[in-house]
């Protein structure tokens, strides 16, 4: 049967496309027509400017058309938009926050992961690869009030850079869980450190990267959604000090406030790190 190493761009792309369709986010289709007209005109105007400035040829126009058709065929619109556009949407959406910095969600979030009491261990295989990581902290409001029972949803790639539900052969909820903080807002969870992630190279996004001579890497990261009733949902990622792709993330989603520096546990069984989340009131 298939293993995660048999993952195909079109399969993870189509899974991400289905996930997006099921997410309820298409309610955003109710954008007023004045706004649609304004934004469509500005974006198209920027395209006309680039064509004139660089004297784009018919060959280049047709290469673009063929590539855009491929993005859809490979199900890679979520991947393309989350890698190259979402970071600016996130920046604008969260510019008034006083609490924790967040960053992009990316294409591989799945709601409804198993709920776990703290201290928790994320669902993982018996022989799950990667350095064990104890990750703990507190969820607080901007004014310092602890948020009892806050939810810390976490999902991340495995030690080979694959996400459950988007690559074959992985248990459904592997390395995905919703940890419920205790009465003092504290949480602790055990997982493994993920590997740096390379976006699929065999689909349309990979073709753009190869054609432009870019690289396909994101630094290793943990994805998080931290929530408590009455507070704004925080969507974030945490990275690891010393990762070679912190300064050239293909998705431009690294912020200095989001970099962890894990230390070796005294008993030598893995790493540990503390990080607190501060939520803005609604
Ligand atoms: C990822 O794992 C990711 O987090 C983003 C933003 C894009 C592609 C793959
Ligand atoms: Fe990711």
Image (spheres, helix red, strand yellow):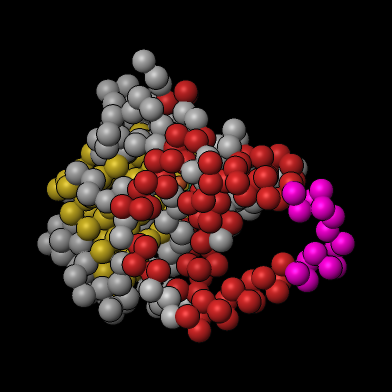
Residue 223 image position (x, y, % from top left): 39, 51
Please tell me whether residue 111 is drawn above or below residue 234 in the rendered image.
above
Residue 274 image position (x, y, % from top left): 35, 53
Residue 190 image position (x, y, % from top left): 28, 40
Chain part drawn in magenta: 48-62
Name of the residue lying farthest toward the top: 1
Which one is in front, 214 or 202? 202
**On the picture, is 219 further left or further right than 25?**
right
Q: Residue at x 39, y 37 (%)?
A: 166
The quadrant in which the N terminus is found is top left
User: Can residue 256 be seen in the rendering of this structure?
Assistant: no
Q: Which residue is drawn at 47% across and 28% down?
A: 7
User: Can residue 29 be seen in the rendering of this structure?
Assistant: yes
Count of marks overlaid on the render: 0
Which one is in front, 21 or 189? 21
Which one is in front, 272 or 236? 236
Main secondary structure along the magenta-highlighted residues? helix
Which one is in front, 70 or 196? 70
The quadrant in which the C terminus is found is bottom left
**On the picture, is 120 further left or further right than 78?**
left
């Amino acid at each position: 049967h298939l293993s995660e190493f048999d993952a195909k761009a079109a399969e993870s792309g189509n899974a991400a496309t289905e996930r997006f369709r099921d997410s309820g986010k298409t309610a955003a289709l109710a954008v007023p027509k004045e706004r649609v007209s304004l934004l469509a005109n500005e974006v198209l105007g920027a395209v006309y400017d680039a064509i004139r400035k660089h004297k784009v040829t018919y060959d280049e126009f047709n290469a673009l058309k063929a590539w855009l058709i491929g993005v859809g065929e490979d199900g890679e619109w979520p991947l393309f938009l989350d890698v190259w556009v979402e970071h600016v949407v996130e920046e604008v959406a969260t510019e008034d926050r006083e609490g924790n910095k967040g960053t992009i969600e990316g294409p591989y979030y799945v709601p409804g992961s198993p709920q776990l009491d703290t201290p928790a261990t994320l669902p993982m295989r018996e022989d799950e690869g990667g350095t064990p990581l104890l990750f703990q902290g507190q969820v607080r409001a901007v004014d310092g009030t602890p948020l009892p029972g806050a939810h810390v949803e976490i999902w991340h790639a495995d030690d080979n850079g694959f996400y459950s539900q988007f690559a074959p052969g992985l248990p459904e909820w592997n390395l995905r869980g919703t940890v419920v903080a205790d009465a003092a807002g504290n949480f602790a969870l055990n997982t493994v450190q993920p590997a740096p992630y390379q976006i699929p190279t065999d689909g349309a996004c990979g073709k753009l990267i190869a054609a432009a001579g870019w690289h396909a890497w994101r630094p290793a990261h943990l994805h998080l959604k931290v929530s408590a009733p009455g507070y704004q949902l925080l969507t974030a990622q945490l990275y690891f000090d010393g990762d070679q792709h912190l300064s050239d993330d293909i998705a431009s989603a690294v912020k200095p406030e989001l970099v962890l520096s894990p230390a070796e546990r005294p008993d030598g069984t893995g790493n540990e790190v503390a990080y607190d989340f501060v939520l803005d009131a609604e």
